[in-house]
Amino acid sequence: MPPKNPFLIQDSFFPMVHYNSAQTDVVENSYGGGGRVVKPEEVNFQPGGMGNPGLAHRRYQDGREAICVSGPGRVAKYRFDEGRLELINEIKIPGHESDYMSGKELAELVAKLDAVGTNDEEFLAITQAVAKKTGISSESWPNGMYGMMDRDGYFYAGFGTVLYKFGDKTPGDAGSELVVVAKRDIKNDLPEELAAEVSRFLGVNMTYDGHVVVALSGVIGILDRDLTKSWLAPIPGEALDNGVIADENNGIYVVTDKFMRKLVWKGDELSLDEADGAWKEPYDWVKKKGSLSRGSGTTPTLMGFGEGNDRLVLTVDQGDPVKVVAFWRDEIPDDAVAVQGAPSKRTAGSAAISFPVKTTIEWSPHVYGYGTMVMGSEFPRVIPADKGLDLLSTVMTMGTTVPGPRGAEKFQWNTETNRLESAWVYNDKGLAWQLSPISTVDNAVYLNTAKDGLYSLTGLDWDTGKVIGTITLGKSVKFNTGGTFVTPLSDGGLYINGFFGPVRIAAPAR
């Protein structure tokens, strides 16, 4: 496990997207085992927000709890203690009103979609009308995606090129409304020529000395938590469609359409200089029709923590074939093995993915120990729109009226040979568009599998890939995560970043 970041909210099941600054997608709660069929009365669905990827959870000093949720058009706060999921308030983000849909509208939409079931023509007609009305696209989808909460309970999320800081109107009160505390438009900090290239936020993270890291195409930045100062490292001409990583030594990692990069935060400068430990390494990239991302589709992930361990950063390239790639993140060790086709020994290892991938892997590698899992995320059917891709309809129909993508594979880093080796492949069922955190308690990963609108969590043993059980969620689009998370809770329940609104599933009665 990566070291805990002292400047993220503590005692939280979800401090930030991807769960920690290393972005490993590992949780320390149990899914409760397979063989469960969730009952309708156990499901608390709160319609609200079109897409709800950003999330952070806070436990207050008096024991009460709340979560902050963000996505295109809004940020909301919910009470979360004693099994609750109750809306306190929501804030519509200026300039993003067209992406917003009310809870009433979304409840009606879910009811309509559930009523038509697997009728493709009717289902598609409904989703396409919503996509056209809201204009939600691959450009607006990332707004609010990388939500994060600091140790003082302030929630950060990016919209367009503006980083927002939210806090309780009454500090320390779980039931208090959420308000905007500060905001900063990163574009205003850039030279005019570079500002013209920057269009949207992707990554938000926290350094281990308590600064906010942001990643946009063409620039990586550090801000103080009050959003009054910024330190920027321009990387002009490099597109960035993924998140940003921070390690405990203030190394900052991003993958662009040209390089895997390490930058170094020095406390008063964000350095790209090799003399400070920064580096960049090209990776295999082939331009492919239909790719959602420019370059790699995956947020990089750290592997190897603690003294004496191999310290790596992993991503997935856009080569032919598509490969999992590991890079040495500090000094290149003496026993580093040259990887065929790699520009230098900075590339530590590479392994082709066994299941078919025509374009990119969009989901970041999930890492636990020296194991890493990647999942299929390609669209079996791409639904066009006036401006390219109808992302909403494409994602909503997968697993309901058309099959979902297939394939999950775990690789193991061999510390003796310095190679990535395939450990197991799962290809039995189509997947929903979702990231699936590894439970350290269960030593298992639960993939969200979907067919004919029935969503189920299929548990796989982390070591062997053997199916260990299934949690049947139900036959409703409310369980469609739209590319986000299902997270186990300490009380035995589950939290779902539902595309049409958050969902809490109660622990089974004992």
Image (spheres, rainbow, N blue to C red):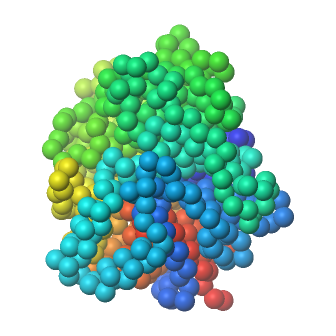
Tell me: residue 145, above or below residue 399.
Answer: above
Residue at figure coordinates x 38%, y 57% from the top left: 98
Closer to us: 55 or 165? 165
Residue 458 in the image: x percent, y percent? 42, 72
Residue at figure coordinates x 25%, y 52% from the top left: 354
Residue 274 in the image: x percent, y percent? 49, 13
Residue at figure coordinates x 56%, y 35% from the top left: 184
Q: How many marks?
A: 0
Residue at figure coordinates x 61%, y 70% from the top left: 87
Q: Is residue 108 left or right of residue 509?
A: left
Tell me: residue 321, above or below residue 348.
Answer: below
Residue 200 in the image: x percent, y percent? 41, 39
Residue 411 visible somewhere in the drawing: no
Closer to us: 365 or 252? 252
Q: Is residue 334 left or right of residue 127?
A: right
> Which residue is farthest right?
62
- Quadrant in which residue 60 is drawn: bottom right
Tell me: residue 166, above or below residue 448.
Answer: above
Closer to us: 510 or 19? 19
> Which residue is farthest top?
275
- Locate the C terminus and report the quarter of the image it occupies: bottom right
